[in-house]
Image: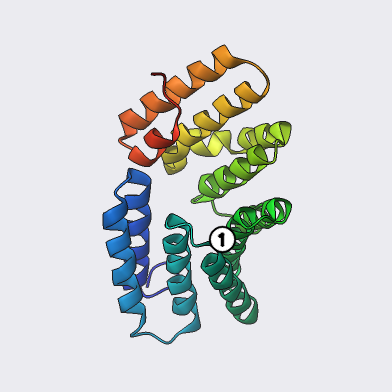
Amino acid sequence: MFAGADQRLSAQEYLSGSLVILGFFDDAVEQKEQLIRTVSQLDKPFDLAWYLLAQCEFFAIFSQYEELLETATKIVEICERHGYAARRSSGIRWRGHARSHLGELDAGIDDVRESMVLWRGQGVVFHSADKTCALCDLLLRAGRIEDASQVLDDVDALVLDTDESCYLAECIRFRGQIAAGRGDLTGAARLFETAVATSKRQKARLFLNSAPQRN
């Protein structure tokens, strides 16, 4: 067992997530499909929640937001019924992601913020930067620049001093967007260039592709 789930599920889920961050989307999809086949052999509610979470990332990759919302809602229901606090946090996060793309940006922000509070309330650090970046992205989409800046301030220590440094380039990119939103275009360009350089150094193709680059 790992993280409370069948180790086959845990291993495949973390592998596919790593492949997404590294930018190997085809390989990530293949791992997700394998995970879905694996879970068909299991019948425990906790494992089912893991399986549905794998589906959520699959739906998000392909922008299938109606399916994402439905699946995330199922996760929250299962986790509330059985008391799976951490998995409930992840389900709420994906529900917020779906809502934000279905015309409910404020509701999406509320969900992702709740997800982050629930997750940190478990006393864990891992995945905190991921959830914080998700919230920051939505806040910037809503034009809430100062709120986004505060969120990044809160996660800086996590990104710099732990294994969560894999999200360093993404945090720098958000800093660039904040600088641009404040009218500091020179500072924004410098931050974007730093984000690109950091992504290259870490070989994180997902974050490299998301950072604006000069022609």
Q: Nearer the viewer, residue 50 or 188?
A: 188
Q: Nearer the viewer, residue 43 or 57?
A: 57
| Residue type beneath disc 1 | Trp
Q: Nearer the viewer, residue 171 or 96?
A: 96
Residue at point 47% right, 67% down? 53
- Residue 87 in sight from this viewpoint: no
Whole-percent x, y for residue 33 in the image? 31, 69
Residue at point 31% right, 77% down? 38
Residue at point 37% right, 24% down? 197
Q: Badge 1 local density, few (<14 within 10 Å), some, or many (20+)? A: many
Q: Which residue is mark 1?
A: 94
Residue at point 62% right, 27% down? 178
Q: Quadrant of the N terminus?
A: bottom left
Whole-percent x, y for residue 204 in the image? 34, 38
Q: What is the secondary structure assignment of the residue under circle 1?
A: helix
Q: Is residue 49 left or right of residue 96?
A: left
Whole-percent x, y for residue 48 in the image? 46, 78
